[in-house]
């Protein structure tokens, strides 16, 4: 009998409990944070060719720098921080920059080759990167330097063509006046018997 009374009392409280009191109930999911990374000194990074993504090449863990944030995957999730060695927070998506990084980039770094070209990556101190990454991106610094890959732009290089405007001929390429009184008139061509206005 007591059990029945307690059940009735519980049901009455649930039905009569104000909605505002129930709104305060929330569910929290604890997402584990990655273990800390121990650096004996601030890391040096390299810029991954054809991107604005920096990576720490001499760690077993994947750690990237992009857009002012440090990024790392761990246990199937992504984390980011403003610092390379602490403050990691869960990031609910794969960062979009990660699509531009070839999975074999570490092998390319180790072999010093990128897509068949000699790659001479320049180590970038962490403090220089933190201070300058935004200016480097705006100035397209690494693109201008071919990311340290010899001949990278040559494979993409094509002569400039603008079909809307034809280049003016150089003086030595202009047509010569024909014999018989014809003269060259710029923009008109040769007109027999027509003298060039001076």
Image (tube, rainbow, N blue to C red):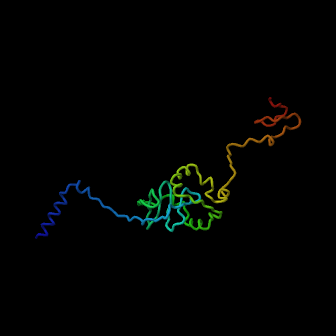
Residue 167: horizontal and vertical position, in percent?
A: 72, 43
Residue 43: horizontal and vertical position, in percent?
A: 51, 61
Residue 119: horizontal and vertical position, in percent?
A: 63, 62
Q: Please report the residue visible at 45 percent of the width from the left and 58 percent of the height from the top.
A: 83
The quadrant where residue 174 appears? top right
Q: Is residue 179 left or right of residue 85?
A: right
Q: Residue furthest right?
A: 180
The quadrant where residue 157 appears? bottom right
Q: Residue furthest left?
A: 1
Q: Quadrant of the N terminus?
A: bottom left
Q: Is residue 184 above or below residue 115?
A: above
Between 122 and 196, the one lying in front of the other is 122
The quadrant where residue 81 appears? bottom left
Q: Please report the residue visible at 81 percent of the width from the left and 42 percent of the height from the top.
A: 172
Q: Is residue 77 left or right of residue 13?
A: right
Q: Please report the residue visible at 46 percent of the width from the left and 65 percent of the height from the top.
A: 38
Between 146 and 179, the one lying in front of the other is 146
Between 92 and 1, the one lying in front of the other is 92
Count all numbered tags in the image, as a single digit: 0
Residue 36: horizontal and vertical position, in percent?
A: 43, 65
Q: Residue furthest front?
A: 40
Q: Quadrant of the C terminus?
A: top right
């Amino acid at each position: 009998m007591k059990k029945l009374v307690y059940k009735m009392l519980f049901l009455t409280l649930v039905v009569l409990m104000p909605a505002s009191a129930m709104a305060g109930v929330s569910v929290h999911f604890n997402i584990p944070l990655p273990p800390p990374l121990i650096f004996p000194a601030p890391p040096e990074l390299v810029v991954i060719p054809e991107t604005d993504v920096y990576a720490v090449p001499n760690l077993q863990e994947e750690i990237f720098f992009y857009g002012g944030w440090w990024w790392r995957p761990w246990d199937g999730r992504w984390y980011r921080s403003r610092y390379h060695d602490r403050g990691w927070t869960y990031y609910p998506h794969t960062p979009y920059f990660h699509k531009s990084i070839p999975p074999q980039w570490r092998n390319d770094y180790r072999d010093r080759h990128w897509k068949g070209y000699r790659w001479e990556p320049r180590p970038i101190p962490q403090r220089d990167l933190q201070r300058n990454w935004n200016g480097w991106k705006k100035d397209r610094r690494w693109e201008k330097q071919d990311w340290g890959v010899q001949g990278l732009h040559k494979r993409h290089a094509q002569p400039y063509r603008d079909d809307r405007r034809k280049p003016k001929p150089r003086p030595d390429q202009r047509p010569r006046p024909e014999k018989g009184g014809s003269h060259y008139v710029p923009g008109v061509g040769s007109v027999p018997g027509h003298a060039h206005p001076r």
